[in-house]
Image: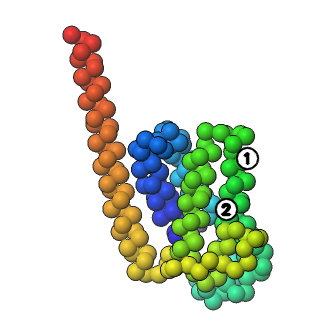
Amino acid sequence: MDVAAHALWTFVIVYLLSQWKPTAGYFNTKKKIATAVIAGFGIDLLFAPQFFYMLTHFPARSDFYQIAPHFPQWMFTWYYINHNYFFIALIAVILYFTYREYTAPATFALALHITMDIFTHKNVFELKPFWPLQQVPFPGLVSWGQPTFFKWNWIILLFSFALVFFHMQYQKRKLLGKQIKAKRKKDK
Ligand SMILES: [Zn+2]
């Protein structure tokens, strides 16, 4: 999925989890939610070496799928390394011993990202999330760049985001009302 959709989907889902009692504790601060969103799209920034290689080795606006077979092996290897559940487990362990309260939001967002990519990456970008144990990639359902999918993904995403936004406003107003009531009681 595109980076912006990854970020926004992560926000929508993590916000819902922050409102659900069993998971609320993992996402109960703005910092934890921000951590999840940054992890949710940040993993795709690890494409930077590939991106730089493409810029320097291929003419601008060349068709991605046409040039992909000419990529050197390391570009795929690096992709399999970072879009990988083992890699996420490693990050989870590191966070657990450094910034423990962010382990859950970051790990959840990274796993969500990989899981979304499994279904929305096709052809050369099909994932091997259990690499190096996995040699044959999971076949994706549809490419995230396929026009119909792209359009409907964003329509549903923006609609979901609008619902979340209104819910946030509603919660804010409810809290403000409570505060005003408490203040009036105190003033009496
Ligand atoms: Zn990705």
Q: Is residue 85 visible?
A: yes
* Viewport quadrant of the C terminus: top left
Say what amino acid the circle numbered 2 marks: Tyr
Q: Is residue 56 visible?
A: no
- Please name the residue that numbered disc 2 is placed on: 85
- Please name the residue that numbered disc 1 is placed on: 94
The residue sitting at the front extreme is 22
Say what amino acid the circle numbered 1 marks: Ile
Tell which quarter ligand 1 is in: bottom right
Residue 92 percent coordinates (x, y) = 68, 50
Residue at left offset 73%, top offset 66% = 81
Compared to residue 31, the image places residue 63 above or below, namely below
Residue 79 percent coordinates (x, y) = 70, 70
Residue 139 percent coordinates (x, y) = 59, 80
96 left or right of 171 in image: right
Work out whether residue 147 or residue 60 is closer to the camera in this orientation and state it.
147
